[in-house]
Image (spheres, grey):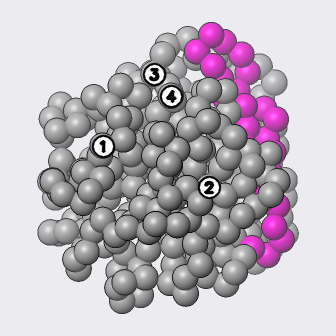
Amino acid sequence: MNRTTSSICIVSGLLAIGLLCMACGASPQPTAAPAAPPTVAAPGMIVFDSSRGGDYRNIYVMDSAGGNVIRLTTDDTNDFAGPWSPDGKRIAYTWFGPTTSDVWVMNAAPPEGGTGGTAQTNLTNSPQIDEGFPAWSPAGQQIAFTTLRDGNNEIYVMNADGSDPTRLTDNPADDFAPAWSPDGSRIAFVSDRDQSPGVYDLYTMNADGSGVTRLTADTAIDYSPAWSPDGTQIAFRSHHDGPADIYVIKVDGSGLRNVTNTPADEWAPAWSPDGTQIAFQTNRDGNWEVYVMNVDGTMAKNLTQDPADDQLPFWRP
């Protein structure tokens, strides 16, 4: 039984409620990407994961117009896309093996050329413990992540080489999906600490775990926070009034607005580096595709247009 068939959390966990899960079997190591794949020359690259390569999800990059698609991983396991390092040279991601998940990093194909998908490195490497949702600090020296090493989902931070993991949250509820503010002073995250189990709100905290502040407080279920490049807004996915939509809220909790508002489900918002656009995934075409839109929700465009499921976009800084 592989991880795809044994665990529904690939969708309902990583993308929706964020609960990391376990399945049975041995843990093969990821294989290296092809030695010399094509290189991306266009600026504005987006990393995403897709099932287009076969039975498992692998990680791809494309330019911001949806062209020059390059496959970076070739695993017989599921790789879920994560963010680029601030210098744009590496990509952090969640590797789902048959028994556990870990935070990995690999080289990315830079705009000036070079080979991507190489130097794949397991940073957490915790047997029988699920870990994921990596988020780079703006300086690139640390990575925040979610882990089950304490029995429930908590947020930790580690050095970018995986050393010195430090616990930031300490709550019997589930805390997960960290996202660093552009100035590095705050971390947004998702938690059900003030709600019934499974009803999640958005919170922020200082980078050392202190000063927790609640941003949303209603019966909706909120996930996937993403800071705007200027640090004044947070985009996120929420079930507020029907299907999941992409919302934007000011960092003080005011000014909530729905920027997609379609009958489809929209997940995983990611801001463009200049703050003018948001990439996201949607099933409005019948399967998961990566779209991009203006920050007010206008001019939505399908970037992937593939019969496979494409999801979890992250824009290169």
Q: Main secondary structure of the magenta part?
A: loop
Marks 4,3: beta carbons within 8 A: no
Quick one: label 4 or label 3, which is nearer the N terminus?
3
Q: Which three-letter amino acid code belongs to the residue tagged 4?
A: Pro
Q: Residues within 10 Å of mark 4 (few under 14, many from 20)?
A: some
Q: Residues within 10 Å of mark 3 (few under 14, many from 20)?
A: some
Q: Residues within 10 Å of mark 2 (few under 14, many from 20)?
A: many
Q: Considering only vertical position in the picture, is 93 above or below 256?
A: above
Q: CA distance from mark 4 to mark 3?
A: 8 Å
> Which numbered mark, 1 or 2, is in the foreground of this view?
1
Q: Which three-letter amino acid code belongs to the residue tagged 1?
A: Thr
Residue, disc 2: 144
Residue, disc 4: 317
Q: Which three-letter amino acid code belongs to the residue tagged 2?
A: Ala
Quick one: label 4 or label 2, which is nearer the N terminus?
2
Q: Which residues are magenta?
A: 105-129
Residue, disc 3: 44
Quick one: label 1 or label 4, which is nearer the N terminus?
1
Q: CA distance from mark 3 to mark 1?
A: 22 Å
**Where, by quadrant of the figure, is residue 195 drawn?**
bottom left
Q: Which mark is residue 232?
A: 1
**Which residue is rendered at x = 30% and y = 65% of the image?**
215
